[in-house]
Image (cartoon, grey):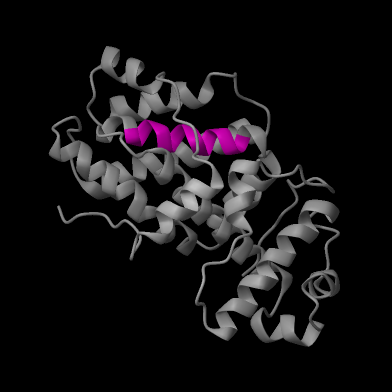
């Protein structure tokens, strides 16, 4: 996989606490190989946070993990593969945190707006991390597969509630993903106004069939807070499987 990270600066801003707490916590009971790989990803996140993506090395990742470079190469052939796993961890953690913040939100349209605005929020508060995730997704589209189930669940809920009127699920998913990823890049590069996240969320809702005034109102509701990491962890421990998109 050939991934260019030229958009990234020599240093990366710290991730917001709402994400970093979940990003660096490993689920219990992982098999040894998976646990080692996850620990290496944790170490890579720490190295890239301090040294930047361009300057961070495999040797530094191994040193932070307390392992040898040989162990790193047993799991990752190149630094680009490490970056892919870092981006995947970031994307899945953000999806999990968004879902945790949506507890009690019953409208599919509002859930869709929250998800889109939170990705825009990431691009605003941690633009270099957002660009990393976008660049990996462009080179390795399988990253989007891990996000798809979260988005699809909210899309199907909105259709079931008759809030969305769509030609097909795939067309709707292309609208959501294409608009969202482009908006993230615009925000991360500093080319968007402060209201861009809500503006784009309103446009997406309108594209899904929500009337103009209703879409504007939903897209500009206050974002629900992320629950405290301890509360989120307790809630996660009561779940036996991740949320899946229901059948159409």
Q: Position of residue 48 (x, y in %)?
A: 77, 57
Of 89 and 9, nearer the camera is 89
Task: Note whether 111 is above or below 85 in the view shown.
Answer: above
Q: Residue at x 49, y 56 (%)?
A: 92
Residue 186: quarter of image: top right
Residue 248 lies within the magenta run: no
The quadrant in which the N terminus is found is bottom right
Residue reaching furthest to the top: 213
Residue 113 lies within the magenta run: yes
Q: Position of residue 185 (x, y in %)?
A: 59, 38
Question: In this rendering, would 168 be left or right of 111?
Answer: left
Can residue 23 be seen in this snapshot?
Answer: yes
Q: Residue at x 21, y 41 (%)?
A: 157
Of 161 and 36, nearer the camera is 36
Q: Residue at x 83, y 68 (%)?
A: 57
Q: Position of residue 63 (x, y in %)?
A: 84, 74
Task: Give the total number of marks visible in the rendering.
Answer: 0
Q: Position of residue 150 (x, y in %)?
A: 35, 50
Residue 80: quarter of image: bottom right
Of 230 and 165, nearer the camera is 230
Question: In this rendering, would 209 be left or right of 160?
Answer: right
Q: Main secondary structure of the magenta part?
A: helix
Can residue 136 be seen in this snapshot?
Answer: no
* Residue range highlighted in magenta: 111-123
Task: Note whether 37 is above or below 150 in the view shown.
Answer: below
Question: In this rendering, would 115 be left or right of 43?
Answer: left
Task: Note whether 28 is above or below 87 in the view shown.
Answer: below
């Amino acid at each position: 996989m050939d991934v260019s990270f030229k958009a990234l600066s020599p240093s990366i801003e710290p991730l917001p606490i709402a994400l970093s707490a979940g990003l660096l916590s490993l689920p219990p009971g992982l098999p040894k190989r998976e646990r080692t790989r996850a620990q290496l990803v944790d170490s890579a996140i720490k190295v890239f946070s301090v040294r930047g993506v361009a300057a961070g090395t495999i040797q530094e990742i191994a040193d932070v993990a307390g392992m040898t470079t040989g162990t790193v190469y047993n799991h990752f052939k190149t630094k680009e593969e490490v970056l892919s796993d870092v981006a995947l961890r970031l994307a899945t953690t953000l999806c999990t945190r968004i879902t945790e913040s949506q507890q009690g939100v019953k409208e599919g349209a509002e859930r869709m707006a929250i998800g889109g605005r939170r990705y825009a929020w990431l691009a605003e508060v941690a633009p270099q991390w957002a660009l990393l995730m976008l660049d990996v997704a462009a080179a390795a589209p399988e990253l989007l597969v891990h996000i798809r189930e979260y988005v699809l669940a909210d899309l199907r809920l909105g259709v079931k509630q008759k809030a969305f009127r769509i030609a097909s699920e795939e067309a709707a998913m292309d609208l959501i993903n294409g608009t969202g990823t482009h908006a993230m890049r615009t925000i991360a590069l500093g080319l968007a106004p402060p209201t861009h996240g809500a503006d784009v969320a309103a446009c997406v809702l309108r594209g899904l069939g929500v009337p103009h005034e209703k879409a504007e109102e939903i897209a500009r509701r206050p974002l629900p807070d992320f629950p405290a990491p301890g509360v989120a962890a307790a809630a996660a421990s009561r779940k036996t499987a991740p949320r899946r998109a229901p059948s159409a």
